[in-house]
Amino acid sequence: MKKLTKFLLNKIPRPMLIKMSIWARPLIYQFFKGDKFYDPIDGRSYRKFLPYGYGKQRENALSPGTLSLERHRQMYLYLQNETDFFIKNYKVLHIAPEQEFLRKFKRMSNLNYISADLYSPIVDVKADILDLPFENESFDIIFCNHVLEHIQDDAKAMSELYRVMKPGGWGILQVPMKNSLEKTYEDFTITDPKERQKHFGQYDHVRWYGMDYFDRLKDAGFEVEANFYSQQFSDAEIKKYGLRLNEILPIVLKK
């Protein structure tokens, strides 16, 4: 299973992976249903989660039913337990939306939910994050998860997200981070996919973010909260939900 997951991630183009997973998910769920792990996104229990990783694979990372990873489940639990996202009327922009989030959020009657991406075949709007086709101060909430590490001019991308967010708005902007890294590691001369895999953890990444990621967000105008949300759960809950203890949830606000 590890070899198959690694092959699919590294060899199949992402738009094709998205299309394949749409029909594959219901079949995968039937095989893995059980009672050891619980995915809060679909409310189902599983006998195990799947391994995941472009390089070294993490055990019990990928939920078979939603294809959610640890960071997705942490985000969902935060939205469910700490916000009024599921109750209040909001206009939401979701950049490069995760499949299960798109499916779930699109059906919520309290949301005016707009998904956008440059390549995904399932979004509402084809859009470049460096030049978003939206008016200033359009959205109450913005989600943009594991996108900025692909963008060379991430400062421009952050400024675009800030521009289209309403005053009083907030968002979750997750990126791959090394908590032990004070300064972001990036080198734009590294363009070979194998070298990018070695240096940045994935063949199409251009950096590893360090803790100065929050300074970059502040430079774009945001107020920032580095939320270690998974630390509020017990060891048993962390294992059941398949969370990572020290994964940071970056929450941004616009005054």
Image (cartoon, grey):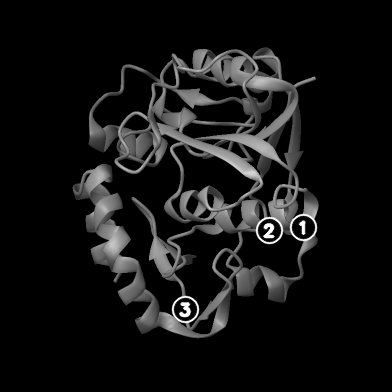
Q: Residue visible at 58% across and 72% down? A: 43
Q: Mark 3: which amino acid? A: Lys
Question: Are circles 1 and 2 on residues that touch, CB within 8 Å?
Answer: yes
Q: Earlier in the sequence, mark 2 or mark 3?
A: 3
**Of residues 187 and 173, which is closer to you in this image?**
173
Query: Which mark is nearer the camera, 2 or 3?
Result: 2
Q: Residues within 10 Å of mark 2 (few under 14, many from 20)?
A: some
Give x and y (percent) for residue 3: 25, 65
The residue wearing badge 2 is 77
> For numbered disc 3, what is the local secondary structure?
loop
Residue 81 is tagged as 1
Residue 48 is tagged as 3
Is residue 239 shown above or below 255?
Answer: below
Q: Mark 1: which amino acid? A: Asn
**Of residues 222 and 113, which is closer to you in this image?**
113
Is residue 22 shown above or below 180?
Answer: below
Question: Are circles 2 and 3 on residues that touch, CB within 8 Å?
Answer: no
**Of residues 8 and 195, which is closer to you in this image?**
8
Among the 4 quarters of the image, the one containing residue 53: bottom left
Give x and y (percent) for residue 184: 55, 26
State how many labels appear: 3
Is residue 16 shown above or below 152?
Answer: below
> For numbered disc 1, what is the local secondary structure?
helix
Question: Are circles 3 and 1 on residues that touch, CB within 8 Å?
Answer: no
Q: Is 95 left, or right, of 28 in this rendering?
A: right
Give x and y (percent) for residue 104: 53, 55
Q: Quadrant of the N terminus?
A: bottom left
Asked if residue 178 shows in the view, the reply is no
Q: CA distance from mark 2 to mark 3?
A: 19 Å
Q: Earlier in the sequence, mark 3 or mark 1?
A: 3
Q: Residues within 10 Å of mark 3 (few under 14, many from 20)?
A: many
Query: Which mark is nearer the camera, 3 or 1?
Result: 1
